[in-house]
Image: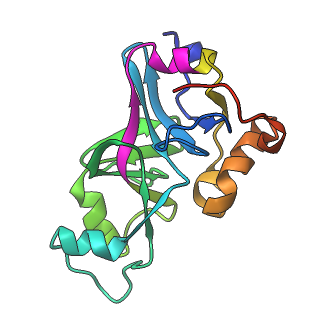
Amino acid sequence: MSEASSLTNHFLIALPSLQDPNFSRTVTYICEHTGEGTMGLVINRPSALQLTDILHHMDIGERPDTPSDMPIFIGGPVQEDRGFLLHTPAKRWESTLLIGDDLAVTTSQDLVRALARNEGPEEILFALGYAGWGPGQLEQELQQDAWIFGPASKDILFHTPVEERWEAAARLAGVDVNLISNTGGHA
């Protein structure tokens, strides 16, 4: 896959016809898209967990200024017990993948510990699990009209209310999902 055709740093938006319960009406931020496969994080499926739940599970103490009400998202059906933190890269952490010039995804505990101390990045999305596709799999699903893709937006990632992200991402891609039929598309 050439860099010019990469979907890295794009939104993958499920069409209304996509009935897979893992992805129905989702927006997935694509962190990496190469000839070896694709990895992304669903950004509009909050779980019942909050940051304090994760901190307690990891035996990390919190402080009074810990952002305890930070939601934890269901990032996808792969490795659902592993945390992925999508953030503005104020600094590099132990295990960080830079995505373009202004976003990164980190999987290391040093960032979680920094969050407990209220020292993490200001713009951050914490997800458990990720969405993954093998070589060519996503391209095949795109041909089957299961998805559309469009440019990513930090405003949608970090500031748009969760319940509005699907329609907002589609609008950014030039599509009104309310005008699309619910038939067709298989993932």
Please say if 126 is above or below 33.
below
Please provide percent x and percent y for residue 145. Answer: 65, 22
Q: In the image, is 96 to the left or to the right of 57?
A: right
Please say if 77 is above or below 64.
above
Q: Residue 179 falls in which quadrant of the image?
A: top right
Residue at horizontal 66 percent and vertical 34 percent from the top: 17
Residue at horizontal 62 percent and vertical 29 percent from the top: 147
- Farthest-out residue, top: 2
Please provide percent x and percent y for residue 185. Answer: 62, 25
Residue 159 can be seen, yes or no: no
Please say if 111 is above or below 146.
below
Instruction: State which region is magenta.
Output: 128-141
- Farthest-out residue, front: 183
Residue at horizontal 68 percent and vertical 39 percent from the top: 16
Q: Residue 52 falls in which quadrant of the image?
A: bottom left
Please provide percent x and percent y for residue 122. Answer: 50, 65
Residue 62 can be seen, yes or no: yes
Residue at horizontal 59 percent and vertical 52 percent from the top: 157
Frontmost residue, 63 versus 16: 16
Residue 138 in magenta? yes
